[in-house]
């Protein structure tokens, strides 16, 4: 890896970081506006035109607030909890392919931080570490509500991780690769995986909702039972990290869903409109972001439409419905591929 | 003069040994778990440097991501406080030291007998998931099926342990 | 000939880690110094809806969570075994499919046992 590539990568890392932070910030704005729309209200209006500066005001406020660490809390772990949540949220974006390669002056810019062989497993590895953020923070707070929220969050996350991992296997059977770049490349044009794997998409989407702790799966932080859940005792930017990590995770989940099932940066007729390869690459990035924004909207739509599950219903859905369903999906996919290849009959 | 990969190797090894020591020296069991997670990360780093990419990421997913969550649950479940921590009797400490010493002796003896095999070509592709899968499902198919029986036994055992007293009502606190 | 994958592919991920770590550390430090500090005894107590907090918060919880975690570890390993199979699905063909069917059916036996013993019920 030469020096210029390293500079490329550093710039790309910084850009992706900035983009995911800004998207997360404006998702909070979007969330409030969309909630307002669904409930026939106005939402934030005061900060700037249409309240557009609201996220900045919120961010600034979180920076300037007093940092409270309870007496009974374990100080080091109390700080570690939100840091882990934020760190894992920031790491997932590394393997997502944002667009086709760009060519400038004989120089090839890859719009992906790292195209590793095990890309999809990397995503799962980082997601599986996200559990610690809630678990450690909730335990360190030494508060009954926090502990309950943390344990609920951990149980829920690990349960839905299984169904998520299983639902992806049918996609891998189709593509024969774990690299997200390969998976996206095989969906060129309009040949998206959603047409072949609608069931896997449905399972994956439900699991993504549960993994990001969004309603209807927001039991770890449901106000009516657990005050604020695992972040009851948190204040200042540490609370901000927990909330922010949730929105970054939502952005990344939307990106992974678009890449796995909706062709990522591919768009219909991309090879027949006769544009230069750079133009198609840039247009692809645009389409990718439209898809991502659509899924973020879908996440919010679900949140403001469907009421919260009961805890036993949530665990039942994860273990007794989604896991068997994804195993059935794997077997069906296997049979169909074998019949198509002619090795069964 | 060390090459970059050699330097990285010594760095990772140093960190992993350091954190492994901190696992056993930490007073708070939750801290121990976190140090152990860092140790697993360093070991995964070693796997990646050997180009055993699949093993490296599986080490993170299974050990750092799954088994350590279980450890953390157990530790939180046991509710270890300063007030409730039992005093270790001297006899137990001596017994522990003897057992540990024996284990150390065994490990040293094993290392004395092994012949070190150095990685011939660190960039070979055998550790990639595709090649590993072919070997697993062609040459080692039977052991693979046996593993599933092992899983079945573990599953039944777990359920038996946790659901031992069906009649006595469990006090569900949360 | 498939493209070669070498350890240096992971260098950018490491760079991103350093970047993210720096960001998190600076933000935590910055807010530590920026905010006001007016500590009080009742402010630093654990929140319990306004009433005096009773007992230790770290009380034992239901064994169900523990059982869920054990079963998660087992299932997670089984799922990991499926990945190398899925990647090679076309090469392995019918033989691999049958092998995986046996594996999955043993998994399902365990799964059914759990459901029959109500290990996954939360009532």
Image (cartoon, rainbow, N blue to C red):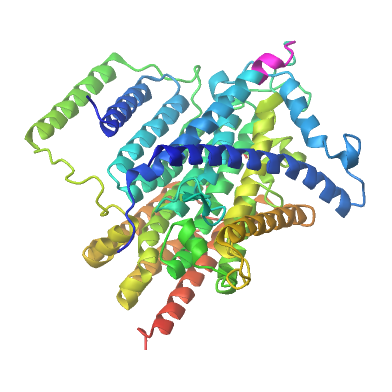
Q: Residue furthest front?
A: A105
In the rendered structure, the answer to whether residue B155 lies left or right of residue A13 reads left
Q: Residue at x 92, y 48 (%)?
A: A41
Q: Is residue B74 magenta?
A: no
Q: Residue at x 45, y 25 (%)?
A: B31
Q: How many marks?
A: 0
x and y percentages locating residue A10 in the rendered image:
51, 37
Q: Nearer the viewer, residue A161 or A190?
A: A190
Q: Which region is colored magenta?
A: C31-38
Residue at far bottom of view: A345
Judge by depth and name the residue closer to the eye, C49 or A229: A229
- Would you place residue A142 above or below residue C37 in this image? below
Residue drawn where x is 27% and y is 43% of the image: B50
| Residue A198 visible in the snapshot | yes
Q: Is residue C116 visible?
A: no
Seen in the picture, residue A68 relative to A132 is either above or below; the reply is above
Q: Nearer the viewer, residue A218 or C69?
A: A218
Give the quarter of the figure containing the N terminus of chain C: bottom left
Q: Measuring from the top left, give residue C81's x and y in whole percent.
A: 36, 58
Q: Is residue A213 above or below residue C92?
A: above
Q: Quadrant of residue A153?
A: top right
Q: Position of residue C87 (x, y in %)?
A: 38, 64
What x and y, as percent, mark residue A118? 41, 53
């Amino acid at each position: 890896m030469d020096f210029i590539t390293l500079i490329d990568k550093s710039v790309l890392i910084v850009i992706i970081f900035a983009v995911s932070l800004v998207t997360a910030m404006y998702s909070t704005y979007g969330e409030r506006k969309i909630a307002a729309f669904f409930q026939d209200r106005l939402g934030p209006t005061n900060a700037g035109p249409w309240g557009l500066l609201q996220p900045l005001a919120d961010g600034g406020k979180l920076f300037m607030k007093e940092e409270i660490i309870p007496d009974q809390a374990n100080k080091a772990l109390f700080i570690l909890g939100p840091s882990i949540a934020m760190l894992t949220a920031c790491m997932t974006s590394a393997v997502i392919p944002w667009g086709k390669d760009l060519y400038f002056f004989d120089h090839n810019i890859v719009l992906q931080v790292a195209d590793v062989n095990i890309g999809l497993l990397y995503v799962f590895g980082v997601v599986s570490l996200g559990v610690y953020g809630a678990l450690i923070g909730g335990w360190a707070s030494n508060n009954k509500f926090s502990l309950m929220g943390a344990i609920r969050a951990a149980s829920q996350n690990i349960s839905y991780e299984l169904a998520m991992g299983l639902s992806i296997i049918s996609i891998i059977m189709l593509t024969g690769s774990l690299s997200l770049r390969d998976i996206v490349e095989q969906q060129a044009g309009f040949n998206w995986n959603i047409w072949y794997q609608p069931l896997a998409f449905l399972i994956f989407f439900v699991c993504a909702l549960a993994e990001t702790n969004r309603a209807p799966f927001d039991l770890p932080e449901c106000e009516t039972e657990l005050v604020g859940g695992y972040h009851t005792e948190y204040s200042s930017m540490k609370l901000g990290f927990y909330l922010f990590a949730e929105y970054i995770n939502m952005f990344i989940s939307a990106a992974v869903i678009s890449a796995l099932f909706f062709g990522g940066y591919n768009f219909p007729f991309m090879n027949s409109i006769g544009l230069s390869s750079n133009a198609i690459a840039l247009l692809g990035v645009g389409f990718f972001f439209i898809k991502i924004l659509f899924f973020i909207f879908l996440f919010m739509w679900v949140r403001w439409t469907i009421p919260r599950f009961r805890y036993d219903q949530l665990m039942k859905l994860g273990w007794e419905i989604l896991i068997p369903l994804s195993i059935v999906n794997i077997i069906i996919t296997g049979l169909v591929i074998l019949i198509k290849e002619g090795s069964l009959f | 003069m060390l090459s970059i990969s050699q330097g990285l190797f010594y760095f990772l090894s140093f960190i992993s040994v350091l954190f492994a020591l901190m696992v056993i020296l930490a007073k708070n069991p939750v801290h121990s778990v976190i140090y152990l997670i860092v140790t697993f990360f360093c070991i995964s780093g070693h796997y990646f440097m050997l180009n055993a990419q699949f093993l490296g990421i599986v080490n993170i997913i299974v050990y750092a991501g799954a088994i350590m969550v279980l450890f953390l649950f157990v530790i939180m479940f046991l509710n270890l406080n300063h007030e409730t921590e039992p005093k270790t009797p001297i006899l137990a400490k001596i017994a522990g030291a003897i057992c540990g010493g024996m284990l150390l002796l065994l490990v040293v003896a094993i290392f004395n007998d092994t012949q070190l095999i150095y990685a011939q070509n660190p960039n070979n592709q055998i550790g990639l998931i595709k090649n590993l899968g072919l070997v697993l499902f062609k040459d080692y198919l039977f052991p693979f099926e046996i593993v599933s029986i092992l899983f079945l036994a573990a599953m039944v055992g777990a359920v038996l342990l946790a659901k031992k007293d069906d009649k006595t009502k469990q006090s569900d606190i949360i | 000939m498939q493209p070669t994958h070498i350890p240096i592919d992971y260098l950018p991920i490491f760079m991103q880690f350093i970047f993210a770590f720096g960001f998190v550390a600076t933000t935590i430090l910055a807010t530590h110094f920026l905010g006001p500090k007016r500590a009080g005894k009742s402010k630093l107590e654990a929140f319990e809806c306004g009433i005096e907090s009773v007992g230790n918060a770290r009380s034992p919880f239901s064994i169900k969570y523990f059982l869920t975690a054990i079963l998660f570890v087992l299932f997670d390993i089984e799922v990991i075994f499926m990945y190398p199979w899925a990647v090679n699905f076309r090469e392995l063909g019918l033989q691999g499919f049958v092998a995986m069917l046996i594996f999955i059916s043993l998994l399902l036996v365990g799964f059914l046992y759990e459901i029959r013993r109500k290990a996954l019920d939360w009532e």
